[in-house]
Amino acid sequence: MLPNWLHIGAAKCASSWLWRVCIEHPEICVPTEHRPDQPDNVNFFTVHYHRGLDWYEKMYFDGYGGEPVVGEFSNSYYRYLPALDRIQKHLPNVKLSLMIRHPVERAFLNWAHLFLKQKPTGMDIRQGIGVPFEKVLTVHGHAWFLQWIDPGNYAWHIKQIWERFPRENVLITLQEDVKVNQVDFLQQFFGFLGVDTGFEASLSGVDINPDPEDVWDYLEPSVRAELIEVYRPDVEALQEMLNRDLSHWQV
């Protein structure tokens, strides 16, 4: 059984929490931690497409038991155009969900996930552990800019999605909505998938991937302010696309 729904991003936007919620729902089939190869971030249409759909189905969906919704989580899909084209080709009627958050915070946490968690106790990240986050704003930091900053250009990426899939098949949510009211968020999400909206997940109120301790101490105010300006045109476009006030993303 191939998926009829994919959660396509973004990284550091509660996808691991949502994946675990979907594991619990009796009407949803997703790869679980009992299956190999990082089932909470499959990325088949990005990384392993050359292995073929038969391999994909056998590797991740051999546990299908007749659930009406079959899907997987892959944070790379929304920003990799070949992946979107492949999905359109093989799964033209698929539903897509995308959760986003403040783009500067998302970018910084993406960096912190790679480097800050690795620092020895008592050592400052600027003493040579990894790549300083402010590297993204230097002339020769373009590779890091593309890795950490580009994923937050949500308006541009969503336009690419809407060009390939019907808008009614695409659910775009904000991570802050999860923090404000998980019950309402999950009712909206389950309603979009067409499964029981009254299902109560055991992970309500649980943050399974909290930010590293004192993480925000490493985000220089001047770097944050400059990245706000980098993202400003995209955020303004996104407000119109989603018909939602995102002015708090511009401060």
Image (cartoon, rainbow, N blue to C red):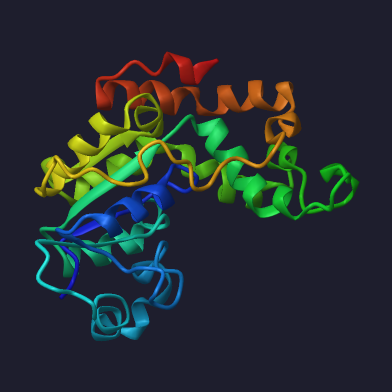
Residue 217 falls in image quadrant? top right
In this rendering, is residue 3 above or below 241? Answer: below
Residue 24: percent from the left, percent from the top?
A: 27, 56
Q: Is residue 55 above or below residue 208?
A: below
Residue 251 percent location from the top left of the image: 55, 15
Quarter containing the N terminus: bottom left
- Total numbered labels: 0
Position of residue 182 in the picture relative to residue 116 (left or right) = left
Going 65% across and 20% down the picture, which residue do you hit? 225
Q: Picture coordinates of residue 184 (x, y %)?
A: 24, 29
Is residue 43 or residue 69 the one in the foreground? 69
Occupied quadrant, residue 55: bottom left
Of 13 and 179, nearer the camera is: 179
Name the residue: 42% across, 25% down: 235
Q: Give the left or right position of residue 53, taking residue 17 as reference.
A: left
Residue at image coords 56%, 31%: 104
Which quadrant holds residue 124? top right
Left or right: 35 in relation to 242: right
Q: Between residues 82 and 118, which one lies in front from this camera angle? A: 118
Q: Where's residue 137, x and y in %? A: 70, 36
What residue is shown at x 61% (from left), y 28% (from top)? 227
